[in-house]
Image: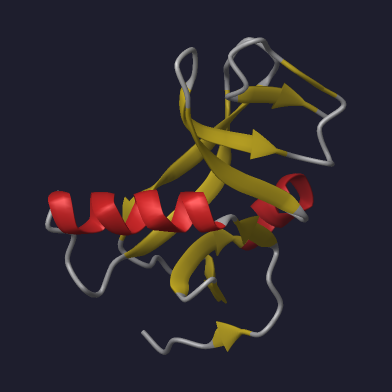
Amino acid sequence: MTETINQTQPILLTEGAVKQLKKIWVDQNVPAHYGLRVGVKGGGCSGFSYILGFDEQKDKDEVYEVAGMKVLMEKAHGLYLLGMEVDWLEGLNNRGFTFNNPNASESCGCGTSFAT
């Protein structure tokens, strides 16, 4: 499979998110040829849920470089994710990845699902 890296950056990964993703990469011994998959799937309390994890590139994927990381995203998911910021929170009441999505018309209380 020929890999073409798109110069546009459909999403933003904050410094905190990149630091945590790199830690997970090392801790879970993720293979070097994998990339960070960002996407959506049907479900969740608001209609769509976010996908965030390491995966192999598939034929339908667009490949981007964001904050030094190889990011994989199905082209059709860009409609829902363009301009989204992925951050990592480390607090007393909340710890984990957060998604700030300008395309979402509403989101649930847990912050992992949204509607357009």
Residue 109 falls in image quadrant = top right
Q: What count of labels does the image hold? A: 0
Residue at the spot x=47%, y=24% of the render?
91
Q: Nearer the viewer, residue 12 or 78?
A: 12
| Left/right of residue 23 with respect to residue 99 in the rendered view | left
| Left/right of residue 69 with respect to residue 7 in the rendered view | left
Give the answer, above or below, for where 86 lies relative to 58.
above
The quadrant in which the N terminus is found is: bottom left
Residue 105 falls in image quadrant = top right
Q: Nearer the viewer, residue 111 or 95?
A: 95
Residue 99, image x, y percentages: 63, 37
Give the answer, above or below, for where 100 lies relative to 78.
above
Residue at the spot x=65%, y=62% of the render?
75
| Left/right of residue 13 with respect to residue 1 in the rendered view | right
Residue 58 falls in image quadrant = bottom left
Residue at the spot x=77%, y=55% of the render?
83
